[in-house]
Image (cartoon, rainbow, N blue to C red):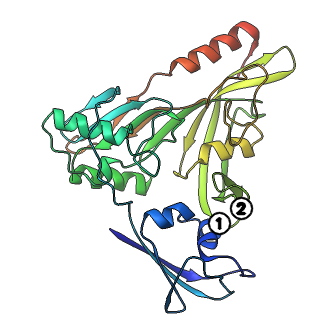
Amino acid sequence: MIRTWSGRVAGKGGQRADKYIADEVGILTRSQLKARKANLIVNGKTEKFSRRLMPGDRLELSWTDEPIHKLEAEKLDVEILYEDGNVFVFNKTQGMVTHPANGNWRGTLANAALWLDAERKGGLSAPRGGIVHRLDKDTSGVIIVARNAEAHEYLSAQFKNRTTRKEYWAVVAPAPAADEGHIENYLSRDRNNRKKFAGGEAGGKRASTDYRVLARWSVESRRDYALVALYPRTGRTHQLRVHMAGLGCPILGDPLYGKKDQLFPNATLMLHARRLRIALPGIAEPMLFKAPEPERFHAVLAALERRGRRIQA
């Protein structure tokens, strides 16, 4: 599928076109522009991405929806929470990429879903390997995959219309001051680090999250920790990580938005997709899927119980 975007250059100009598109527009990174066979037209003329832009330049961009690369079935160790003829629901492990991309063509959840579907003689025919939503590589938990085009369309519409209900668990430090709250701002790619996103009052894409503190601990009167439930109302990249860091309570083990913790110096990202409520094709009532908390959560929470003092939340 060919996708398109158009707009005019704002600001002072002078940037290369590929850098402007990646940093200011934020729809594709510079590597994605190459991988997805992007084509650039400036003021009606085809140009290279090295072209320096001027204020008011009219840009027209087109690119393929995904890099041209055949998805291959691969037998992998994955936990299935639910399956029927239309969907798989997995408990994704930390460290597994959801869908193939540059540098990660093998070992992804999409590769595993294709193998499982073939084993069941399903003939997976959904676009994008059945992926309708994603979890970051270092986020674990519940994720749903479509097994055919009709299911893909049915599920995708719910994510687009925000009728699904998602709950994540996270360990944060320090703990939020309030027991519950709402965070809403606009997220855009960080200008100084394209791997990160930043929140602001204007520009970017609107992002909305509710949170609730489930438990609090004070450790040696020096630092407090909390287990929080996070309810994203939108589905932006790194949304929960940026929102908690912006609240002053970064997620424990977050290498991008947090700092190494003295009590848990080896902690990996403590973010887990705990529950997903979604309607399935052919089933009248929405279903609720739960992914049990992984071992890294058990270990950290047990350590907090041993070394800290539980505070009523």
Residue 15 vertical position relative to residue 166 in the rendered view, above or below: below
Residue 279 appears in view:
no
Eyeballing the image, is 12 above or below 102?
A: below
Q: Which residue is mark 2?
A: 191
Spatial CA distance of label 1 from label 2 is: 6 Å
Name the residue at the left extreme: 121
98 sits left or right of 296 in the view = left
Residue type, label 1: Asp
Q: Position of residue 283 (x, y in %)?
A: 22, 40
Residue 225 visible? The answer is: yes
The residue singled out by tag 1 in the image is 23
Give the residue at x 74% y 58%.
Answer: 192
- What residue do we see at 28% from left, 44% from top? 72
Q: Quadrant of residue 193?
A: bottom right
Mark 2: few/some/many CA within 10 Å (<14, 14-19, 20+): some
User: Residue 154: percent from the left, percent from the top?
Assistant: 28, 52
Q: Position of residue 304 (x, y in %)?
A: 70, 14
* Sequence-earlier tag: 1 or 2: 1
For the residues labelled 1 and 2, say whether their Cβ atoms are less than 8 Å apart: yes
Numbered circle sitting on residue 218:
none
Which residue shows up at 64% across the image and 59% down it?
189
Identify the residue at image location x=79%, y=22%: 262
Nearest the eye: 161 or 242: 242
Q: Amino acid at mark 2?
A: Arg
Nearer to us in this view, 93 or 158: 93
